[in-house]
């Protein structure tokens, strides 16, 4: 994973156009605060003091050319824990839902439609879990994350940001996304910034208007996992069993992007069953399905759009490979291919005007700097709502005691108490 060992954690903002700007032109004033004290602060902006409302006219550009600089330092992700969700979506602070990859034939002939009508229990998409499972893991493992050498009143966790891997994936792909916007809610609590997603109106409408064909094709991805995963290291896949999408195994990883210390979790499909496989997350495998590629145009689109999302999703937690099943129009897998994450950037280099990993990571880093700059009030009832639509800037608004609040009372109370809990 060569990009993890990149250099230049704090590239100079003087050598490129600034990504930060005001919606109202305001360049005549120069707030001369020491801009060397925090290297990722937007230029010519004073930082609000704690509790003061930030200047909501600030915005962040997603224009690709602003992020074409050296790849930022991204520390090799380290797995600090895992958790499981059972068939009723109950949380367990262990790896009981881990599955093991069983390599199929190169032409497997898997019928992905099998079981859709009669052996499928679908998770309820209308239940918005926010960060709750991740927060349960933090409470159960608080001693692993406590800041060293700090007073109890300053910062409980030695972490800048807590979020889901999927939210970070949306940040990485934003400079190249042309269809779907997003909203991210941010709350600063005891020195740590928590990022949770808010469903946009467009996403809600899309979900309500999904066709039966779309619903079935979403099932196909899960069904592919059922054909290729076993519940035990010496077991065999059981594609004749019930498929329940409530079940999940999630890794929790810690890393650093430039000067942002990150803790995030993401669902893992399976791991290598070889007992000599490297330690997690390097033993994990991401499973994907995609339409078979029959024309040069289809291959180009696969490189430009699908490989971007596959790369971003696996690069973040340090998952080294994606195993893809290519299917025909009827949902039958006709070919298999493995994509090492470290090789994907070479696959796309001959595509004209294609995506660049450095743009993705630099935008994500600048977004996190932007959040640190605006989300200043340390208060679980204050939410900074960051909104973005394709070809627009990222903007934000501030909300107090609103429906956007997402840190639950049980988490706030437990984190505020002096003793870490030892729940499992």
Image: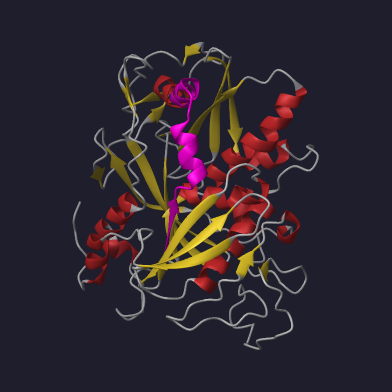
Residue 69 in sight:
no
Q: How many marks?
A: 0
x and y, in percent, of residue 146 in the image = 33, 68
Identify the residue shown where x is 42% and y is 19%: 227
Q: Is residue 162 above or below residue 189?
A: above
Residue 202 counted in the magenta span: yes
x and y, in percent, of residue 293 in the image = 67, 21
Identify the residue shown where x is 31% and y is 80%: 153
Nearer the observer, 165 or 62: 62
Residue 414 in sight:
yes
Identify the residue shown where x is 69% and y is 42%: 345
Nearer the observer, 29 or 189: 29
Q: Is residue 199 above or below residue 126?
A: below
x and y, in percent, of residue 249 in the image = 35, 39
| Residue 137 in the figure: left or right of residue 336 | left
Q: Quadrant of residue 411?
A: bottom left
| Residue 71 in the figure: left or right of residue 107 | right
Nearer the observer, 357 or 1: 357
Q: How is the image coloured?
A: secondary structure
Residue 70 counted in the magenta span: no
Prevailing secondary structure of the magenta residues:
helix
x and y, in percent, of residue 70 in the image = 71, 60
The stretch in magenta equals 194-219
């Amino acid at each position: 994973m060569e990009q993890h060992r990149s250099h230049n954690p704090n590239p100079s903002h003087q050598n490129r156009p600034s990504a930060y700007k005001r919606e109202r032109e305001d360049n005549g004033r120069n707030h001369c605060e020491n801009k060397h004290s925090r290297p990722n602060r937007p230029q010519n902006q004073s930082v609000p003091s704690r509790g003061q409302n930030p200047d909501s006219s600030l915005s962040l550009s997603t224009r690709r050319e602003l992020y074409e600089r050296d790849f930022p330092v991204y520390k090799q992700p380290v797995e600090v824990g895992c958790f499981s969700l059972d068939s009723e979506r109950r949380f367990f602070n262990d790896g009981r839902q881990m599955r093991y990859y069983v390599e199929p034939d190169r032409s497997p002939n898997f019928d992905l439609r099998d079981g859709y009508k009669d052996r499928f229990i679908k998770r309820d998409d209308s239940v918005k879990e926010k960060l709750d499972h991740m927060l349960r893991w933090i409470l159960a493992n608080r001693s692993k994350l406590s800041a060293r050498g700090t007073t109890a009143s300053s910062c409980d966790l030695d972490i800048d940001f807590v979020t889901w891997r999927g939210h970070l994936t949306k940040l990485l792909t934003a400079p190249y996304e042309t269809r779907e916007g997003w909203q991210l809610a941010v709350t600063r609590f005891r020195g740590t910034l928590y990022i949770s997603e808010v469903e946009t109106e467009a996403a809600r409408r899309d979900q309500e208007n999904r066709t039966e064909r779309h619903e079935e094709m979403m099932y196909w991805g899960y069904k592919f996992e059922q054909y290729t995963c076993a519940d035990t290291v010496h077991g065999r896949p059981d594609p004749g069993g019930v498929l329940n999408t409530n079940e999940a195994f999630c890794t929790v990883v810690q890393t650093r992007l430039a000067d942002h210390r990150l803790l995030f979790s993401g669902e893992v499909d399976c791991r290598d069953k070889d007992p000599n496989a490297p330690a997690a997350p390097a033993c994990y495998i991401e499973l994907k399905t995609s339409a078979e590629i029959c024309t040069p145009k289809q291959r180009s689109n696969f490189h430009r759009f699908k490989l971007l999302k596959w790369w971003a999703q696996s690069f973040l937690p340090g998952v080294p490979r994606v195993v893809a099943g290519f299917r025909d129009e009827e949902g039958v897998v006709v070919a298999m291919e493995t994509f090492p994450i470290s090789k994907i950037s070479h696959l796309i280099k001959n595509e004209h005007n294609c995506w660049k990993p450095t743009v993705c990571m630099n935008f994500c880093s600048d977004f996190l700097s932007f959040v640190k700059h605006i989300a200043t009030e340390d208060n679980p009832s204050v939410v900074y709502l960051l909104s973005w639509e394709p070809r627009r800037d990222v903007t934000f608004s501030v909300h107090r005691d609103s429906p956007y609040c997402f840190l639950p009372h049980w988490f706030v109370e437990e984190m505020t108490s002096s003793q870490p809990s030892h729940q499992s």
